[in-house]
Image: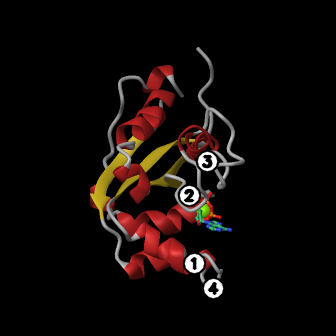
Amino acid sequence: MPEKTGTVERTLVLIKPDGVQRGLIGSIIGRLEKKGLHLAGLKMLVLDGATAERHYAEHTGKDFFPSLISFITSGPVVAMVWEGPNVVGMVRSMMGATNPVAAAPGTIRGDLAISMGMNLIHGSDSVTTAKREIPLFFSAQELCAWQSTETDWLV
Ligand code: DAT
Ligand code: MG
């Protein structure tokens, strides 16, 4: 059997309000599930302004910040934590570039989105960022420790 390598990481994924409105929750989760990533937590919520501003704190002061906050709080999002070796980078690859015009075909944004503002999905951009973002959405009790029967054939 191949050797198992890699430290387990966690990443925060949001299906943004456009993904919920467009009926793409199942398609987006399906892509991550089919890849073999491990789901550790999931909920649907409407973000309040303060949490949205903390989540996107790195963009405070940029010209698009007000519209970003207004969009992300405009309706329900689906928040998830996925975990596994290299999961942060894998989710970023599967998301595609921030601007869907530049996102490669085969990626979520490349296949399913058109506009920079409404690009369907958020994924933490580093392990450090994930550690800051996850507690904004999930308490420790809301994350499940469970073993998929497929794990031995995946990682
Ligand atoms: P990503 O979502 O790929 O991590 P980001 O963190 O740079 O990208 O930006 C967060 C979101 O803000 C992004 O998904 C869409 C929006 N955004 C980023 N840059 C923008 C810009 N120049 N004009 C309008 N919206 C922008
Ligand atoms: Mg980002």
| Mark positioned earlier in the residue sequence (3 or 4) | 4
In the rendered view, would you say 75 is above or below 80?
A: below
Amino acid type assigned to the residue bearing label 2 in the image: Ser
Q: Are marks 3 and 4 in contact (CB under 8 Å)?
A: no
Q: Say few, some or many: other residues with alpha carbon within 10 Å of mark 2 (under 14 / 14 to 19 / 20 or more).
A: many
Q: Label 3 belongs to which residue?
A: 92
Q: Say few, some or many: other residues with alpha carbon within 10 Å of mark 4 (under 14 / 14 to 19 / 20 or more).
A: few
Cβ of mark 2 under 8 Å from ligand 2: the answer is yes
Q: In which quarter of the image is ligand 2?
A: bottom right
Judge depth for marks 3 and 4 and give the one in front: 4
| Measured Cα–Cα span from mark 1 to mark 2 | 18 Å
Secondary structure of the residue carrying tag 3 is helix
| Measured Cα–Cα span from mark 2 to mark 3 | 8 Å
Cβ of mark 3 under 8 Å from ligand 1: the answer is yes
Q: Label 2 belongs to which residue?
A: 124
| Measured Cα–Cα span from mark 4 to mark 1 | 6 Å
